[in-house]
Image: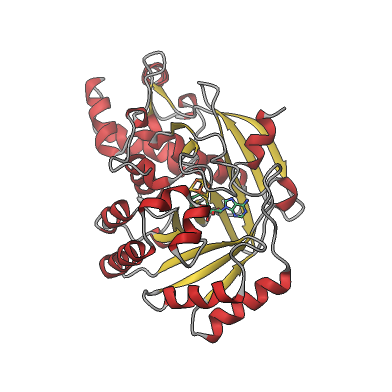
Amino acid sequence: MPSTTTDSPTTEPPDDGNRSALLALDPTGLERELAAMSQPRYRVGQILRWVYERGAGSFAEMTDLPLELRDALAGAFDLYESEIVAESRSGDGTLKLLLRWRDGATTECVMIPDGDRRTACISTQVGCPVGCVFCASGLDGLDRQLHAGQIVEQALRVRGICGESRLSNIVFMGLGEPLHNYDATVAAVRAINADWGMNIAARKITISTVGLPKQIERLAGESLQVTLAISLHAPGDALRRQIIPWAESIAIDTLVAAANTYFAETGREVTLEYVLLGGLNDSPQHARQLAAVCKRMRGSVNLIRYNPVAGLPYMRPASEDVVRFQNILRERGVNAHTRKSRGLDIDGACGQLRRRHENR
Ligand code: SAH
Ligand code: SF4
């Protein structure tokens, strides 16, 4: 069941051998830490520029800081915490990284090139507590939360592999349910968006959620203009509950109301994501019902062809069924797109690379 409190205590960056996570700090937090080390305020800007503008991988590289300070920083903070333990490149250029954190937990992040666009797909949790029946990420439940610094670290790592091309978009569509790790997700969004941080426009940042109404309403009040994508996957409550266990306590009506609040407060139209599962939610009747739901809100539909997961019985729908589904929506005035399947040959869907690795 979705809890009303969004954060478990493990969201806080752990002190690791007395070191804390630098990437979890905003300028105010960093200033406080530096003041405790008797450092002047202007060091904040210097350090943030090294980390976010110049992409420094260690304190040693920050050559305009006194050597003593670089050593003191390395003793007090972790910059990058993860180790890249697997890398797989797909024929279409998609590159997936498996990161291992100090406690041995692994998460995925992905770089998806598309024309001039470079998108980073990042994770917010180790595993996922929701357990949607078709998804590899939730098969073993939630291991732990990632802290804000670990979320930002993934975006920086992906930016690092973009080379000369600029990282342009961020999607929170990796492992986990972002709004179930609310504080860390919002702090990470701020660091990714801020001009002191990665400086990526809010509208190029998408948070994908299974749909937690209270948290969506809270997000609407954060003065962030991020794109919100709600994973609907069914046009009626009964079928949605079969697919998404947490939908048991969340009616589609409540979600539509939350989406409308989000639009009213932010001016941003909400995207409904709909994973098409062959023979389960992809009939013309489902499409007509979905069109009726869409009429009650401002937004568009993103259709996703299911990416089969080993060991699960769900099927990728036939291409003609996808086209028919999309046409029914469009005929009814709904703005509907079908998302390209990327990285299919490298366990493209979230959670699959990690699972394969752990099952070895
Ligand atoms: N927990 C959030 C974000 C992570 S999942 C959410 O559910 O929205 C991001 C998107 O990938 C969701 O829409 C999810 O339904 C979809 N997804 C997960 N596994 C998939 C698979 N095997 N094939 C296609 N889409 C999948
Ligand atoms: Fe969790 Fe999203 Fe996967 Fe559902 S689809 S189990 S909410 S990651």
Residue 199, x across and y down, in percent: 41, 52
Q: Quadrant of the C terminus?
A: top right
Q: Residue furthest top?
A: 17
Q: Which residue is nearer to you in this view: 140 or 198?
A: 140
Q: Residue furthest front?
A: 238
Residue 234 x/y as whole percent: 51, 63
Residue at image coords 26%, 66%: 265
Compared across the picture, whether 49 is left or right of 175 comes to left
Residue drawn at 41 percent across, 60 percent down: 228
Residue occupying the point 28% across, 38% down: 27
Image quadrant assignment for residue 76 = top left
Residue in front for this viewpoint, 326 or 223: 326
From this viewpoint, is residue 263 visible? Answer: yes
Residue at the image position 42 percent from the left and 46 percent from the top: 178
Quarter occupied by residue 222: bottom left
Compared to 242, does 269 lie above or below? below
Image quadrant in which the N terminus is located:
top left
Q: Is residue 232 visible?
A: no
Query: Image height check: is 36 above or below 170?
Result: above
What scheme was used to colour the molecule?
A: secondary structure
In x, y percent, where is residue 100? 57, 28
Residue 107: image quadrant is top right
Q: Closer to the camera, 269 or 81? A: 269
Question: Measured from the top left, where is residue 201 in percent x and y?
Answer: 41, 59
